[in-house]
């Protein structure tokens, strides 16, 4: 693997042999970005099935099967609409049909999280299940999709970090000649395996699952804090550079603030409630 000519540090992104298109068959292109979403949903569903087999699970296998459809709609609708509203409203207003070109990227996690929460609320209301307890179980599956999504961002050569002289700096094709932090991979590791292990440990070794809202709050708070911190070494979206300069924070950081506050409130309320007894843990 050779360095780009003229760069003292850093690895040329193009020399890694990564292509945003996984498979090209005529006009049809299967992209890593799409595969990341599909794989995240499927693996999350499989893990939710595993969790639903626990004796005190708030949902059964059939609920897990049905819920994945509702959650998928929530992820796509919420994630896309939030990106359109908060990140590129003018561009999509000028060309409304481009809102539906999901394969080109452009999803907001914050919107996807809201969409999933709303979809789960509607599902649980129709099935008379405990919304917050089901949300606790779904939250434990979310880091899987987050990790895969960030890896797809890296392969797409988007959402790169600030310039760096560290030896693992990456030169992205559309970001100029300077090596940059692979902030997508930092987020993949922090929001994926690290957050997954924290939630798993809380679930297995604490009273979190007996306190509705604690697992959801831990996920929301953990994601909010980790994303907020990584944004300091990440370049703001090109169309939001002026916004970041004017406010002192990236759009992603501002959207994390209510997550951090809300996650903390959920955890505090969960631990202020009495623990649910085994009979109360039944669906």
Image (cartoon, rainbow, N blue to C red):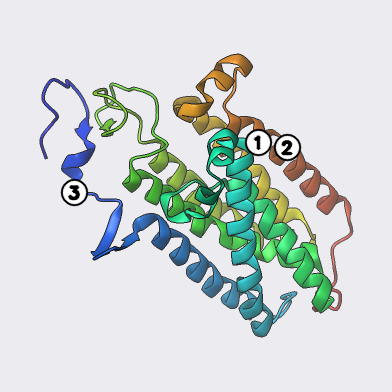
x, y (%) of residue 250? Answer: 57, 27
Hey, which residue is sitting farthest bottom in the picture?
62
Q: Residue at x 52, y 74 (%)?
A: 46
Indicate whether 151 appears above or below 36: above
Label 2 close to label 1 by CB (< 8 Å): yes
Disc assigned to residue 17: 3
Q: Earlier in the sequence, mark 1 or mark 3?
A: 3
x, y (%) of residue 59? Answer: 72, 77
Q: Residue at x 82, y 53 (%)?
A: 270
Residue 246 position by quadrant: top right
Q: Left or right of 107: which side holds 168? A: left
Depth check, front residue: 280 or 260: 260
- Let me know if residue 259 appears in the view: yes
Depth check, front residue: 248 or 34: 34
Marks 2/1: CA–CA distance: 6 Å
Marks 1/3: CA–CA distance: 34 Å
Quadrant of the drawing holding the C terminus: bottom right
Disc assigned to residue 255: 1
x, y (%) of residue 78? Answer: 64, 53
Please name the residue that numbered disc 2 is placed on. Answer: 258
Q: Residue at x 30, y 51 (%)?
A: 20
Residue 247 position by quadrant: top right
Q: Residue at x 67, y 65 (%)?
A: 137
- Let me know if residue 207 appears in the view: no
Regarding mark 2 in the picture, which secondary structure is present there?
A: helix
């Amino acid at each position: 693997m050779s360095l780009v000519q003229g760069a003292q540090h850093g690895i040329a992104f193009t020399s890694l042999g990564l292509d945003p298109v996984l498979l090209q068959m005529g006009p049809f292109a299967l992209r890593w970005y799409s595969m990341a979403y599909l794989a995240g949903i499927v693996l999350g569903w499989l893990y939710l099935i595993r969790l639903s087999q626990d004796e005190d699970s708030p949902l059964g296998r059939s609920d897990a099967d049905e819920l994945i459809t509702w959650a998928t709609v929530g992820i796509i609708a919420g994630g896309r609409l939030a990106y359109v509203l908060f990140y590129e409203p003018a561009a999509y207003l000028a060309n409304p049909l481009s809102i539906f070109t999901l394969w080109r990227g452009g999803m907001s996690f914050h919107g996807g999280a809201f969409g999933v929460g709303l979809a789960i609320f509607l599902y649980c209301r129709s099935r008379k299940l405990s919304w917050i307890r089901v949300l606790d179980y779904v939250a434990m599956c979310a880091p899987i999709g987050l990790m895969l999504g960030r890896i797809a961002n890296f392969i797409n050569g988007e959402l790169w970090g600030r310039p760096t002289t560290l030896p693992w700096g990456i030169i992205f094709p559309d970001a100029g000649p300077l090596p940059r932090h692979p902030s997508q991979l930092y987020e993949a590791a922090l929001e994926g395996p690290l957050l997954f292990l924290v939630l798993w440990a809380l679930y297995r070794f604490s009273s979190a699952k007996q306190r509705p809202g604690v697992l959801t709050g831990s996920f929301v708070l953990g994601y909010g804090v980790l994303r907020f911190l990584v944004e300091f070494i990440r370049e703001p979206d090109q169309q939001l550079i002026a916004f970041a300069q004017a406010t002192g924070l990236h759009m992603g950081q501002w959207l994390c603030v209510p997550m951090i506050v809300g996650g903390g409130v959920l955890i505090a309320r969960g631990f202020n409630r009495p623990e649910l007894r085994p009979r109360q843990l039944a669906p």
